[in-house]
Image: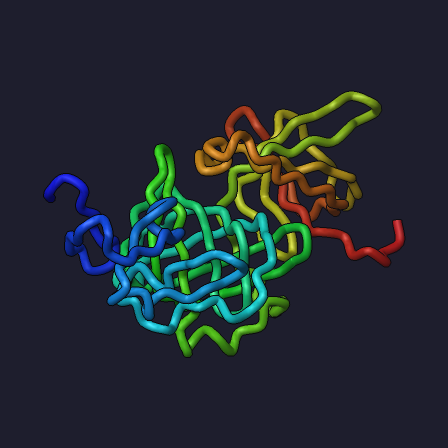
Amino acid sequence: MAAGNKKCTVCGRSYPAGRDFRTVNLPGQFVGYVCRNCAPKITESEGLFTAVSAGDWSTDERRRHTRKPAHLLLTFTHVRGNAVYPGIVRDISQGGIRFSTKARVSPGELLNLNVFSPLTGLHVKAVAKVKWLRERETYNDAGVEFTAEGRHLRMDDRRSHHRVLAEFVLHWHNRGKPVEGRVKDISQGGIRFTAAEPLPEGRRVSVTLHATGLEVVRAEGGFPLTVEKTIVVVGVRKSEERYEIRARFAAENESR
């Protein structure tokens, strides 16, 4: 590229520095330059010029719906694969989500998503198309759009108690003494965890869960996903030197 020329981020062509360029925020990078020929492919949103899509530059990814900041658990698989990858949802709307993950995804790929919140019981299962990917030093940010198959799903659909493999530290008190456990999986209805000491079946316990195991969480400076819940123990069995405990979440109006 000749000295003084600028390269258009969209078409990749180099133009003289005097040509009409716009500075834009693109999904794949912080700042880019767009020539006047490609400018119609950019839409203005919230006072900033934002790329419509980093994949095919279609008009499908305009985030017409209001985004809500979210700190939700996410697992996903590639539509043609079996491997399960974890992630953390950063924001969510009726049309799609933005999430962080250590896994590599590519624009245009279809993903099977499971989004879950142990705090509210929110559970979303949907198929989504990757629209853009932003590579960071220790993790990736990705934006996905729900496909027509997934758009009819309600975000408050609580009918399915799908289990999500999770890495939580669990704390409670036994006669004033703090006790720590490790959550193995979690669903809308309850959790399975291990601890050094048992809890009797039927015991009602107030617990605090801290999501600390995901590397994505640590990459964000130790983002604290902390949830306080009341559980009722439904099963206990000895597993090597620890106890495996199954418990359901108590209803808010449930009597002690």
Report whether residue 10 is seen. yes
Of all residues shown, which one is farthest toward the left?
Answer: 2
Q: Residue furthest front?
A: 18
Which residue is the extreme one toward the right? 255
Residue 58 vs 46, above or below: the answer is below
Q: Nearer the viewer, residue 30 or 193?
A: 30
Of 24 and 164, nearer the camera is 24
199 sits to left or right of 144? right
Instruction: Give the image location of residue 54, x and y in percent.
Output: 31, 59
Q: Is residue 237 visible?
A: no
| Residue closer to the observer: 252 or 214 | 214
**Where does residue 172 sit, x and y in percent of width and height?**
74, 31
Q: Look at 26% across and 59% down and name the residue there.
A: 35
Q: Residue at x 41, y 78 (%)?
A: 148
- Left or right side of 173 for 106: left
- Residue at the top extreme, as displayed: 177
The image shows residue 255 at horizontal and vertical percentages of: 89, 54
Residue at x-position 59% and y-position 52%: 70
Looking at the rendered image, the quarter that the N terminus falls into is top left
Q: How many marks?
A: 0
Q: Is residue 42 above or below residue 238?
A: below
Q: Residue at x 54, y 60 (%)?
A: 46
Q: Is residue 54 above or below residue 159?
A: above
Q: Is residue 173 left or right of residue 240?
A: right
Quarter of the image for residue 128 reads bottom left
- Closest to the observer, 80 or 41: 41
